[in-house]
Amino acid sequence: MFADKTLTPRETVRLCALGTIADAPDSYAEIARQVRDFITRITGPSLDLLGSSMELLHIEGLIRTTDGSTLDDTAQLEITDAGREELRRLMTANLRSSSDLSKLVTALKFRFLHLLPPEDRAAQAELLLDSRETELNRLLDMRKAHGHRHGPFKDWLDHEIAQAERALAWLESFCDSMPPAAADSAA
C-alpha cells in the first residue's frame, strides 16, 4: 500500500510555527501573529489551517518558554531539540503535486464551462479572474511584508508573482474573448 508522506494541513501549520520560532524566538503572542499572518497571506483565511494551536507544540515538548514560565501571551518561546527534529522531519517531507484543491476546481470549471448558459459562463469567467487577482494581491502583500529578505524565499516569491501576473493576463484575455451573453444566446 502506498504511504502518503506529504504534509497535512495541521503539519503545515506546525512547520510554520516551529520554523518561525527557530528563525527568531519571540513572545507567544507575536509568534502566533506571525504564523497567522504568513499562512493567511499565502492561502487566504482558513479555519482548517489556523485551527491548530501552539499550546499543543508546548505540551508535546517541541517548544518551551525561555524562562520556564507558563505559556501566556508574553511568554518568550524557543524551540527545543525535539522541536528541531520535528522541524527537520516536516521540512524534508515530500511535496504533493497539485495538492491545492482550488487548482482542481479551476480545471473543472474550465473543463465544463461550455455546459453553462452564457450569462453563467461570463459570471464564472469573472469569478476566476477575481480569484486570480486576489491571489496576485496576496502575493504582492507577502512581498511587501516579507520580501525584503534576500535568498530562496524572495526568489520563490518573485517567481510566484511573475506566474500570477502571467495567469492574470491570460485570464483577462480569455474574458475579453468571450462573446457577450446576449449575442451568445441569440445564436
Image (cartoon, helix red, strand yellow):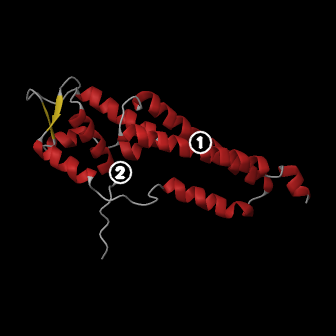
Q: Residue 9 carries which label?
A: 2
Up-down relation of residue 154 to residue 26 (above or below): below
Side (left or right) of 143 relative to 51: right
Which residue does the image show at 33% across and 30% down from the upper left?
A: 33
**C-alpha span from label 2 to label 1:** 27 Å
Residue nearest the observer in this picture, 164 or 70: 164
**Disc 2 vs disc 1: Cβ atoms closer than 8 Å?**
no
Say whether disc 2 or disc 1 marks the residue closer to the N-terminus: 2
Residue furthest top in the image: 74
Q: Residue 106: x percent and y percent?
A: 59, 55
Q: Which of marks 2 and 1 is in front?
A: 1
State whether residue 60 appears in this view. Answer: no
Q: Residue 1: x percent and y percent?
A: 30, 77
Residue nearest the observer in this picture, 44 or 117: 44
Which residue does the image show at 30% across and 41% down from the upper left?
A: 16
Q: Which mark is residue 165?
A: 1
Q: Residue 22: x percent and y percent?
A: 21, 37
State whether residue 139 appears in this view. Answer: yes
Q: What residue type is disc 2 on? A: Pro
Q: Residue 156: x percent and y percent?
A: 42, 43
